[in-house]
């Protein structure tokens, strides 16, 4: 029991001595450890901030590139519409001309084969 009181008393003296040492400008081991951890944390924060800035720039460049690609796609779509529209119109025109010429051919063929009894009206399925 006496030993226990002595240990408690010595611990109190040690705390007072550390407090006085610290107050007078002394640096204790705990302070050195905290300062070291603080410096490491600050270094890590700076590195992460640099990485973040790099990733932001990279993202901006990729977004600009994406915008350019979208604009190119829109332009190509418009060009494709302009190209396809006349070709569809031309195909319809060619088809109408073919039907017209075929009807004329059938009418002429009817006149020629009138007396032969040929069936010149076949059923067409164009679509």
Image: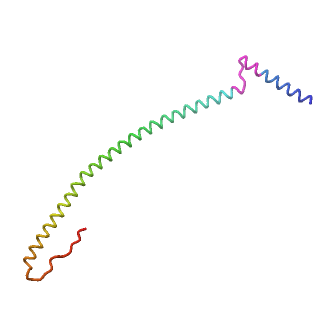
Is the magenta region chiefly helix, strand or loop? helix
Q: Residue at x 79, y 21 (%)?
A: 16
99 or 63, which lies in front? 99
In magenta, the rendered stretch is 18-31
Could you say which is closer to the camera, residue 46 or residue 114?
114
Give the residue displayed 15% in from the left and 64% down from the top: 97
Q: Position of residue 124 (x, y in %)?
A: 21, 72
Quadrant hosting residue 72: top left
Name the residue at 7% across, 77% down. Answer: 112
Q: Is 103 placed above or below 75 here?
A: below
- Residue 60 position, x and y percent, is 42, 38
| Tag count | 0
Where is residue 31 drawn, in percent x and y? Answer: 69, 25
22 is within the stretch colored magenta: yes
**Is 56 part of what is drawn in magenta?**
no
> In this view of the protein, which residue sits in the foreground, 118 or 67?
118
Q: Is residue 69 above or below residue 108?
A: above
């Amino acid at each position: 029991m006496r030993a226990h009181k002595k240990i408690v008393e010595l611990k109190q003296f040690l705390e007072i001595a550390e407090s006085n040492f610290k107050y007078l400008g002394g640096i204790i081991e705990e302070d050195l450890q905290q300062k070291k951890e603080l410096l490491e944390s600050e270094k890590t924060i700076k590195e992460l901030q640099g990485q973040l800035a790099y990733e932001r720039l990279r993202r901006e460049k990729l977004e600009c590139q994406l915008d350019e690609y979208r604009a190119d796609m829109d332009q190509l779509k418009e060009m494709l519409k302009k190209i396809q529209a006349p070709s569809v119109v031309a195909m319809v025109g060619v088809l109408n001309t073919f039907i017209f010429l075929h009807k004329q051919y059938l009418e002429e063929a009817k006149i020629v084969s009138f007396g032969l009894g040929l069936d010149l009206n076949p059923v067409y399925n164009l679509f």
